[in-house]
Structure formats: structure tokens, C-alpha cells
Image (cartoon, rainbow, N blue to C red):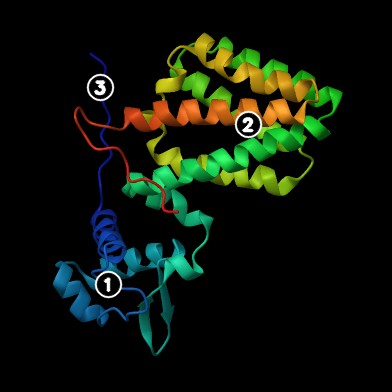
Amino acid sequence: MPVEIIARQSAVDVLEHRLREDILDGTHGPGELLPPERELAAGYGVTRTTLKHALSRLEQAGLLSTRHGIGTRVRDFLRVGGADLLPMLAARDNGWLAEVFEVRGHIGALIARRAAGRRTVRQARRLAELLEAVAQAPDGDAAQLADVEVHRELARATGNRVYLLLTNTLFNAYLPVRAALRAPFEDPAEAAARLAPVVRAVADGLPDEAEAAATRYLRATEKIMLGSLLPPGGARPAAPRA
């Protein structure tokens, strides 16, 4: 029987998680100063050294801001935060994940359209190779990763590097829950067939067809992915706000 390795959480890991949850659920609200370190450490039952390490991590994550002589303040991440927060937020709340997929749909369709109008012959060949890698993947995990590379190449084919960075950002946003979103890729041949119309339209230089095919593909995979997160009889993730 294979041995399952279970990651051990340190006191810093546990405290970081608790503080992050307290920040995101409003226990420590945006703009508020956290209590003094001695008081905060006592409240969480940890040493000040453990607290300092946890606070440092959350500051690096963009949730806190520390100023010498003033203290540590909770940042209003919806006002000043960036896309680097998305992986943490999507892993915590399926509502955020649903919003990530909404943006994925808009950006993905636009990328396919731009790629169809700008791709080179070499990029068209590369897309065909990457699509074949999806079809030949040995399992769902490998097919999922191969699918990601197709979308990176589509973004690259637009000739606009910002689209490539946006694509990376969106994939990173659901990276923490990637294993739970593997359902569309469990049959690699079917996954490739689903994606093939997008690649074909881009390779043929047909922007309208590429955009329409990408929209169909992204909606279909979104439905499968989000559906796989539902427990039996569970509620669907919160719909994106208008």
C-alpha cells in the first residue's frame, strides 16, 4: 500500500490561516489597526515570534501593512489589492472562483479572436502539436496541464504579452484547487476534441469563428468544473455579481 505523505502544519502556518480567515471574514476589518503584538499574541495563544512570522507572511500576501511607530493595519484589498490575491481568495471561497471563471470566459474569447488574426504559421503548427499532446496525455492530470499550454500559446499568438500575463494570472487563481477541477480532462481524447474547434479556427485565421468556438469551449468546461465542486445536493457557487 503506498504511503500517503501528510504535510505537517507549523504553528506559524496555523496562525497565518486563522489570521487570514479573520481578515477576510471581517473580524479584522479593512483599515483597522490590529491590536498591539503582545495583546494579539496572547489572544491567539502563540508567542510573539510566531505572530511576527505570520504577520510577515500576510503582509507579503498583501493583506496587511506595517509602519514603524504606528502598527499593523488591515489593507482594503478590494481597493488596493492586485490579481496576486486571487489564488488565496479562490481557494477560500467558490464564489470567487465563479467570478474568476466569468473573467476567464471574457478574456479567453477575446484572446482567441486576436490570435486568429495575428498568429504566425509557426504558431499555428505549435497549437496543433499542443492539442495533440492533450489527446495523447496519459491521464486527466496530464491532459489538464497540456490544455493550459494550449491556452498559453493562444495568448502568445495574439502578439500582446499582457494577454499572456493575464492568462497566467487566471490559471494561477485556480491552481490551489486544480485537482478538484480535473473533470473535463479525465478523458484526454474527449478533452482534445472539445478544444479542437478553437485551435482549428485560430489556425485557419478566422476571428469570428475562433471567438465563438472559444466561448462555447469555456462555457462548457466552466460548467463541468464548477459542477464537480458541488457536494451531492449542494448549492451552486454564488453567481458573479453584475
Specify the quadrant that holds the C terminus. bottom left
**Mark 1 vs mark 2, CA separation in Å:** 39 Å
Q: Which residue is mark 1?
A: 28
Residue pictured at 58% horizontal, 31% vertical: 215
**Amino acid type at image mark 1:** His
Across and down, in percent, residue 52 comes to 32, 70
Position of residue 138 in the picture relative to residue 156 (left or right): left
Of 38 and 19, the residue lying toward us? 19
Position of residue 232 in the picture relative to residue 92 (left or right): left
Q: Are marks 2 and 3 in contact (CB under 8 Å)?
A: no
Specify the quadrant that holds the N terminus. top left
Q: Which residue is mark 2?
A: 151
Foreground mark, 2 or 3, reads 2
Q: Which structural element holds mark 1?
A: loop
Q: Which residue is mark 3?
A: 3
**Amino acid type at image mark 3:** Val
Q: Which structural element holds mark 3?
A: loop
